[in-house]
Image (spheres, rainbow, N blue to C red):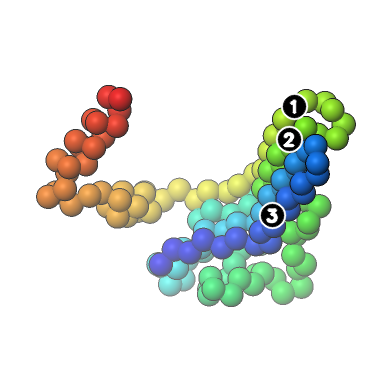
Amino acid sequence: MISVIFDDFNVDVTQHPDNLDATLTLGGMHVHDGTPPETLYPDIIRMKNTPSCISNPTTPKLENKNETSIFTPDDPFFYVKFEHNPLDKRADRVLTLKMKAMEVLYHCGYLEEIFAFLKPPKSQLESVAALLVTYFLK
């Protein structure tokens, strides 16, 4: 099975009488592939230059136990901040997005399996086509 592992997910919302600050941070993310038993690349998607999770995706551990976690609150993998009427008056609304580099392991077998999973049964193809036509012709 494939599992998605998120590390250090935080949401902070501050409401003042005249402004609103909302911040969402994600310390890290891995997409772990558990289908092949002894693969060289257990994480098919991960942050660039990070250690990989080992065999059991439900208990993420670093490959080298002497390494310290690279996820720090000051330097997250994904950062989104929305400000409505910021206190410094630089704009009416401010949206800040930051994301670190990712490594994605391409394997055609993964794409074929995802496509097969999302493909509707033949008996439902006409219904799906009718829904799509109705939606896009509005």
- The mark nearer the N terminus, 2 or 1, is 2
Which amino acid, by three-letter code, is at mark 1?
A: Asp
Mark toward the viewer: 2 or 3: 2
Which amino acid, by three-letter code, is at mark 3?
A: Val
Q: Quadrant of residue 8?
A: bottom right
**The label number, if any, that marks residue 70 in the structure image:** none
Crowding at dot 3, Cα within 10 Å, few <14 / some 14-19 / many 20+, comes out as few
Q: CA distance from mark 2 to mark 3?
A: 16 Å
Q: Measuring 73% from the left and 53% from the top, which residue is drawn there?
A: 12
Q: Secondary structure at mark 1?
A: loop
Q: Is residue 112 visible?
A: no
Residue at numbered disc 1? 92
What is the count of numbered marks? 3
Q: Residue furthest front?
A: 17
Which amino acid, by three-letter code, is at mark 2?
A: His
Crowding at dot 2, Cα within 10 Å, few <14 / some 14-19 / many 20+, comes out as some
Residue at numbered disc 2? 84
Mark toward the viewer: 3 or 1: 1
**Considering only vertical position in the picture, is 110 above or below 54?**
above
- The mark nearer the N terminus, 2 or 3, is 3
- The mark nearer the N terminus, 3 or 1, is 3
Q: x, y percentage for residue 13?
A: 73, 50
Residue at numbered disc 3? 11
